[in-house]
Amino acid sequence: MSEEKKQGFDTLAIHSGAEPDPTTGARVTPIYQTSSFVFDDADHAASLFGLQAFGNIYTRITNPTTSVLEQRVAALEGGTAALAVASGHAAQQLVFHTMMAPGDEFIAAKQLYGGSINQFNHSFKQFGWNVKWADTTDIDSIKAEVTEKTKAIFVESLANPGGRITDIEAISAVAKEAGLPLIVDNTMATPALFQPIKHGADIVIHSLTKFMGGHGNSMGGVIVDAGTFDWSATDKYPLLSQPCPSYQGMVLHEVFGGMAFAIACRVLGLRDLGAAISPFNAFLILTGIETLPLRMQKHSENALAVAQYLQAHPKVTWVNYAGLESDSHHGMLQKYCPKGAGAVFTFGVKGGYEAGEKIVSGVKLFSHLANIGDTRSLIIHPASTTHRQLTDEQRAAAGASSDVVRLSVGIEDSADLISDLEQALAAV
Ligand SMILES: *Cc1c(COP(=O)(O)O)cnc(C)c1O
């Protein structure tokens, strides 16, 4: 690991966590498509079950293909350990399950992926976990929501769908002052463009389904532990700081130190809630990550070209893309994401809701669907789809008002993408 730390990001994206297979010599990490693993002997079995040794028992909890993916993402984000799971939403559920008890609260940015807003508002309520929404562009509004019951602050680094850049350092300062862990969803930026841990995040999560896998072919999620948060400073996080009844009274933070959060998410949350990733998906996502730096660069170049084209179009009222020099977030981009602003941005079209629907129906090369982070270019009208369940006010706060069209610009030729939008806009 210490040798790997010195390698550059592009090298880590290809090599970190992987070795040629010791038995067959296979150069690419094999798909260990097995649900369970034979123990060496009875003592080995007992030590695995007692958490005295690391190893494989059952694919719900660990799998060798998935372990390579976990080590790779931990290295790319600069964390101590990671846990890969079935989806981004499963990652979010496990993170909160490890921190929260019924009646607890957490603070989340209003500027979030629509699915996360639903998960937090509705399903989390059923666990007795209460979300308090704050505007991340107004740091005092975050501070104002901190109570004795608050357990964490949750933000996106680049906020979906608006593509806005969050001031992670300012929010980290609020979290530190309040003694709370800062959780950053880094799905849209990926560590190729932005590394939240360097700016004060304690936990990073991803939907691996998006740019990390990058090809629109598999679901996955990951939790990365920065190892920076002191879970034992208060008695607020008993799963980490108190004796654990299902592991003979072991105190996870005491035994596992800077990896305790990732381990707790695995040996309590994943063990009992069960949202394991398939080894096949872990393999496809690992393969995708090898080209992550190249893809994010091309995504960002193409998105900038398309944004510049749209900005000059008479039927377009505004474009929100931090890569544009005129954009209000351009300064923040230079501070946090100097390599590029990523693939996803929104624009407003004259004619509101109807015009938005016309564009998504008129495109031919762009695919009209609910995803981001594919090699292919994608388009959606959030107000009639992903953000449909929200009130007008929530939609506006999330950057998804009725005239908004969202693009996830792929890595095709930008000239082809521009001509496709041109013919679709001509029909509006
Ligand atoms: C897609 C997405 C999620 C949810 O991930 P799934 O893999 O779809 O469960 C969470 N956050 C962001 C920013 C996303 O884009």
Image (tube, rainbow, N blue to C red):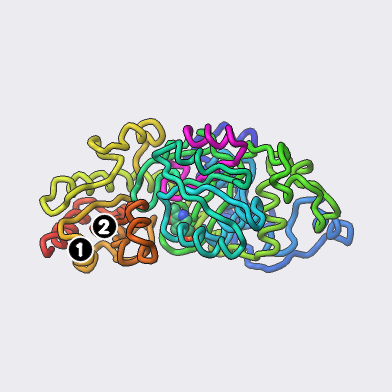
Residue span colored magenta: 169-193
* Some atom of ligand 1 lies within 8 Å of the CB belonging to the residue at label 2: no
| In this view, 60 is above or below 189 | below
Determine the secondary structure under disc 1.
helix
Rendered-image quadrant of the N terminus: top right
Residue at x 72%, y 56% (from the top left corner): 267
Instruction: From the viewer's side, name the closer residue of 333 and 176.
Output: 176
Image-based side of 401 in relation to 249, left or right: left
Instruction: From the viewer's side, name the closer residue of 317 and 16.
Output: 317
Q: Is residue 88 visible?
A: yes
Residue 35 rendering spot, x and y as whole percentages: 68, 68
Determine the secondary structure under disc 2.
strand
Which residue is tagged 2?
405
N-terminal-most mark, 2 or 1: 1
Q: CA–CA distance between discs 2 and 1?
A: 8 Å
Classify 10 Å Cα crowding around label 1: few (below 14), some (14-19), many (20 and above). Answer: many
Which residue is tagged 1?
359
Residue 150 rendering spot, x and y as whole percentages: 60, 46
**Of the residues shown, which amino acid type is indicated by label 1?**
Ile
Residue at x 53%, y 63% (from the top left corner): 281
Residue 88 rendering spot, x and y as whole percentages: 51, 57
Q: Is residue 181 magenta?
A: yes
Mark 2 touching mark 1, by CB under 8 A? yes
Q: Is residue 214 visible?
A: no
Residue at x 10%, y 51% (from the top left corner): 314
Residue 324 disc label: none
Classify 10 Å Cα crowding around label 2: few (below 14), some (14-19), many (20 and above). Answer: many
Q: Is residue 165 magenta?
A: no
